Image (spheres, coloured by chain):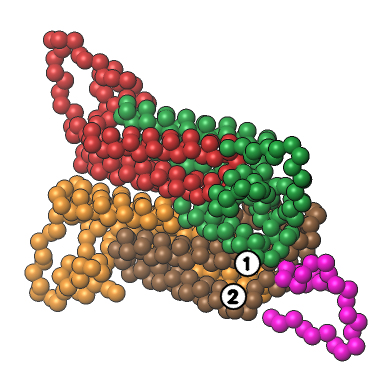
Chain colours: A brown, B orange, C red, D green
Amino acid sequence: MSIPEPPPGTPVPEQDERPPDCQDAGPGDVPTTHARHGYLSSNHKADYLRRLRRIEGQARGLQRMIEEEKYCIDILTQVSAMTSALQSVALGLLDDHLDHCVAAAVTNGGDEAEEKLKEASKAIARLVRS
Amino acid sequence: MSIPEPPPGTPVPEQDERPPDCQDAGPGDVPTTHARHGYLSSNHKADYLRRLRRIEGQARGLQRMIEEEKYCIDILTQVSAMTSALQSVALGLLDDHLDHCVAAAVTNGGDEAEEKLKEASKAIARLVRS
Amino acid sequence: MSIPEPPPGTPVPEQDERPPDCQDAGPGDVPTTHARHGYLSSNHKADYLRRLRRIEGQARGLQRMIEEEKYCIDILTQVSAMTSALQSVALGLLDDHLDHCVAAAVTNGGDEAEEKLKEASKAIARLVRS
Amino acid sequence: MSIPEPPPGTPVPEQDERPPDCQDAGPGDVPTTHARHGYLSSNHKADYLRRLRRIEGQARGLQRMIEEEKYCIDILTQVSAMTSALQSVALGLLDDHLDHCVAAAVTNGGDEAEEKLKEASKAIARLVRS
């Protein structure tokens, strides 16, 4: 999904205070869906997609192992590997989020900074406890 | 991988000491692959497959979220949900394994009991640490 | 809490079916407190005590670090080390429990076997999720 | 370890760009030891100390349970409770660190911001994986 170029002659919109790293989709954006975030460089995006496709493949592999009634311990080893792969994705996403969205909000200060920090803290707690 | 039917006229092999719950595939079975284990009742098997298909769907949903650059925290929430679902599958499989394979080995005693207990203990450590 | 010596002349009780590894304290034992379990060899017991004393020391060290307002990340590193040490103790205790109490109950079979397996499974789930 | 008062007549040092929340001890501070950090309000500090004293007590309680050979599962329940208490302390400290030290570094920008974010990310990874 690429950002549509504005037609020529469109007046340049006033600059959002927030840097482009974490901006919402602009007019028409429904805040709760946060339709679009530029926090992912295209490099990182491709990397996450590749890793998640592999994780999807692991989920299919596990189904095959259950189907064929493979040895339980071997299945558990695969589940542990898949859990670790998921955790790595989560930690990577969290880093990107801290480096871009949270850092941008902190630079701007105010309520949004506080809100973003609180939100990140809850996400970290969920990761630590899951 | 299905168990090959013995050709007609094959003498019925002597019964394995172990209960059917955890037996290997018998003649032709390669020990390291543990081709087939009866530790899964067909009920449980269908349940695990259903849960793993859902987990596979979650992995695809995450790819879509990355593709559409959804809000990072929302993606992390989905990753946490998926991790919890995977952990539940792992705990269920471990229970089935303790209840059937390990319990059967313990009942028979000897080296196999010790080996199965050690193996289960390592799988638990991997789960706790992952 | 020590086991009271039976008065002299007390008839020797009939042997419990269960091996000494996991037996309760016998007459006078209050079931819910499980006053005494022989699942711990004296070697293991000394080892657990040594490790828990070190963990207690880590808890005191953390208080000192907070008191002196040491750098937060250094405190977190110590907390992670302490958590890992606790997990190792838990995994060791669980192994001892599976190898002795659960294995003994399984050998005897019946309701107790089932109950012990269920109880172990819940303890494992608590460890995995904490 | 307290910050030595400057002798009377010492010129007031120029203000550090960073807010007082996360500043190092100033002249004489060895960067790697980060001798003193003001990221802890006295309220939070008292709260962490209280919680760590309780955790220390739990470590002593566990020694007593091992000493008295309490039922293994009951000991494991206490270990899980203690692990959760430790995790809560870690999450609280991490929040304070993000809200003060990391936020201050980000506001100042530059290499230190990047370094603090990287350092926080590693601490989070250690927590998630321990």
Relative placement, left or right, of D31 versus C99 is right
Q: Secondary structure at mark 1?
A: helix
Residue D80 appears at what percent x and percent y?
Answer: 45, 41
Q: In this figure, which residue is indicated by the disc labeled 2? A: A44
Relative placement, left or right, of B13 versus B54 is left
How far is the residue under mark 1 from the one under mark 2? 9 Å
Q: Chain of mark 1?
A: A
Magenta range is: A1-29
The disc at residue A96 is 1
Picture quadrant of residue A2 = bottom right
In depth, the one of D50 and C104 nearer the eye is D50
In depth, the one of C60 and D22 nearer the eye is D22
For the stretch drawn in magenta, what is the main secondary structure? loop
Residue C33 appears at what percent x and percent y?
Answer: 36, 25
Q: What residue sits 69% from the left and 65% below the top? A: D110
Other residues around mark 1 within 10 Å, as few (<14) / some (14–19) / many (≥20)? some
Residue B94 appears at what percent x and percent y?
Answer: 36, 54
Q: What residue sits 74% from the left and 53% below the top? A: D16
User: Are labels 1 and 2 assigned to the same chain?
Assistant: yes
Picture quadrant of residue A81 = bottom left
Q: Secondary structure at mark 2?
A: helix
Q: Is residue A27 magenta?
A: yes
